[in-house]
Amino acid sequence: MTARRHPRPVVPLLAAAAALAASPAGADDVTARARALHREAIVVDAHLDAPDQLADKWADVARRGATDHFDLPRAAEGGLTAPFFSIYVAAGYAAGGAARRAFELIDLTRRVVDGHPKEMVLATSTAEIRAAKQAGKLGVLMGLEGGHAIEDSLGVMRELYRAGVRYITLTHTNTNHWADSSGPFYEADFDPKRYVVHGGLSAFGREVVKEMNRLGMIVDISHVSDATVDDVLAVSRAPVMASHSSCRAIADMPRNLTDDQIKRIAAAGGVVMINFGSTFLDQKTWDWLKTAAAKIRPEWIRLRAKHKGNPAAFAAATTALWSGVGARPRAPWTKVIEHIEHVIRVAGEDAVGLGTDYDGVPDPPIGLEDVSLLPKVTEELLRRGHSEARVKKVLGENFLAFFARVEATRARLAKEPPSAAVYRK
Ligand SMILES: [Zn+2]
């Protein structure tokens, strides 16, 4: 989940249809190889925001168009094996009800999966992802987005693990009581300094990370500040992941990772899962957003004061304000490939995967509008000369190997007692 408060652009269905129609006509050796490889491969998406959309507006996922970017027919066309449904708890819940929201979305995810037992199964481990593939089902995992949803309690965190959650994004756009966030980059008066409270992780935040390692809960550093990344890498006993972040070297925005961060995450056995939002992919889109934000900033600040204490009214007013600045330019889909190749160049072929942020971003790239189009990634990587083994790594094997290392850390720490650390103001 990134910036849902932006108006959603109309998905150009014609472009998607044209791309699909074009492939049989241009079918050649690579196309055939790509199809076979994609069918065989385990395809992991580390961040899919369908639950939040379904909570807003319930729909049967068997029906095409159930959410913006996901449903079972499109997931089947896309060859998707294992999406992490995001248990996204918005920053606003930090004021109250965050854990409740998390458990409601876990319940929602289970209802979705239970409603389609022939097509879907809940997965909580590498073995269960592989079993789902064998059974020809979509293996749905859960990742909690927004560390404030543990409500500063390691007991709540352990219950989330028992409920099936397998990663926690330490912060969303809000700095919580124990970790600094990179902040809400899409707000017109965004000032990163306002989100620096602990200078990274607090002492309790370090306990949270260590307890996550013991549990086998993946530590996700998407959304956190650069100082928090440093602290996490210093304290974590397991490798860590960025579930939906791309490369700052290509699109220089705060939610993306520097080459140095990518290298250190990879050196520790972690993975970087590429975000498909145009703002994350393309410097042009990011520059457009910055220019537009500067234009609306005075009015934004006025609205913030006017609607103080009424976040719903403020959200509605700023959405209207954004819609007045015109359509955000979208990236070409091949930018996704550039980011994948960049991580491979900087940190090697074992460090990269996919974390689309579908249903969470308003601006997927032109040509990769939803999950049904994922086979294009496979075909393009092959076309650019990447080996079949490498393409399988990018699609899912890198994530599985990483998750296995997190599971191995859990096994190694099995004798350690649960942490008794308690948050104090
Ligand atoms: Zn997010």
Image (spheres, rainbow, N blue to C red):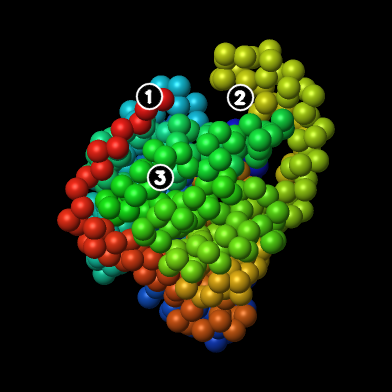
Q: Position of residue 366 (x, y in %)?
A: 66, 57
Question: Of the residues tagged 1 and 2, which is closer to the observer?
Answer: 1
Answer left or right for 72 relative to 255: left
Answer left or right for 19 relative to 421: right
Q: Is residue 39 above or below residue 234?
A: below
Q: Quadrant of residue 392?
A: bottom left
Which residue occupies the foreground of this view, 71 or 144? 144
Instruction: Identify the residue under disc 1.
Output: 97
Tag 3: residue type? Arg
Tag 2: residue type? Ala
Query: Whole-Å distance between the Cαs marked 2 and 3?
Result: 33 Å
The mark nearer the N terminus, 2 or 3, is 3
Q: Position of residue 135 (x, y in %)?
A: 25, 66
Which residue occupies the foreground of this view, 216 or 300? 216
Instruction: State the mark number for residue 206.
Output: 3
Question: Of the residues tagged 1 and 3, which is closer to the observer?
Answer: 3
Q: Is residue 154 above or below residue 316?
A: below
Q: Quadrant of residue 40?
A: bottom left
Residue 194 in sight from this viewpoint? yes
Q: Secondary structure at mark 1?
A: loop
Question: Of the residues tagged 2 and 3, which is closer to the observer?
Answer: 3
The mark nearer the N terminus, 1 or 3, is 1
| Cβ atoms at labels 1 and 2 below 8 Å apart | no
Q: Secondary structure at mark 2?
A: helix
The mark nearer the N terminus, 1 or 2, is 1
Instruction: State the mark number for residue 237.
Output: none
Q: Residue at 33%, 28% (x, y): give it.
A: 100
